[in-house]
Image (cartoon, grey):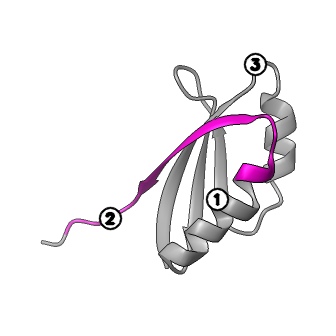
Amino acid sequence: MMEAFVLVVVKPGTEEKVYETLRGNEKINEIYRVYGEYDLILRVGVSSIEELDRFHDEVLRRIKNIEMTETLIASSYRG
């Protein structure tokens, strides 16, 4: 299992609508509303890069009120 954090910018005033659209998705473990450059942060769990690609293509890109995303793939320290 791999984790990614997706930083999301939405059209102004649509934060709640986008949240409601995303909240039932089985790949999303947590959703946070944040202030600043981004509007939402998603913690996403997937089994592979290919599954992350499908999540982006089939879920995020189909939500018209999402203007931009930035995806950070989480890694752990070994020590």
Q: Is residue 28 visible?
A: no
Observer-nearest of 73 and 43: 73
Q: Position of residue 2 (x, y in %)?
A: 46, 73
Q: Which residue is mark 1?
A: 56
Seen at 79% across and 41% down, the residue is 19
Q: Is residue 46 above or below residue 30?
A: below
Residue type at tag 2: Ser
Q: Amino acid at mark 1?
A: His
* The label number, if any, that marks residue 72 in the structure image: none
Is residue 67 magenta-colored? yes
For residue 23, above or below residue 17: below
Q: Which one is in front in this view, the residue at disc 1 or the one at disc 3?
A: 1
Q: Residue at x 58, y 67 (%)?
A: 53
The magenta span reads 61-77
Marks 1 and 2 in Cβ contact (< 8 Å): no
Query: Quarter of the image holding residue 58?
Result: bottom right
Residue beneath label 3, please?
12
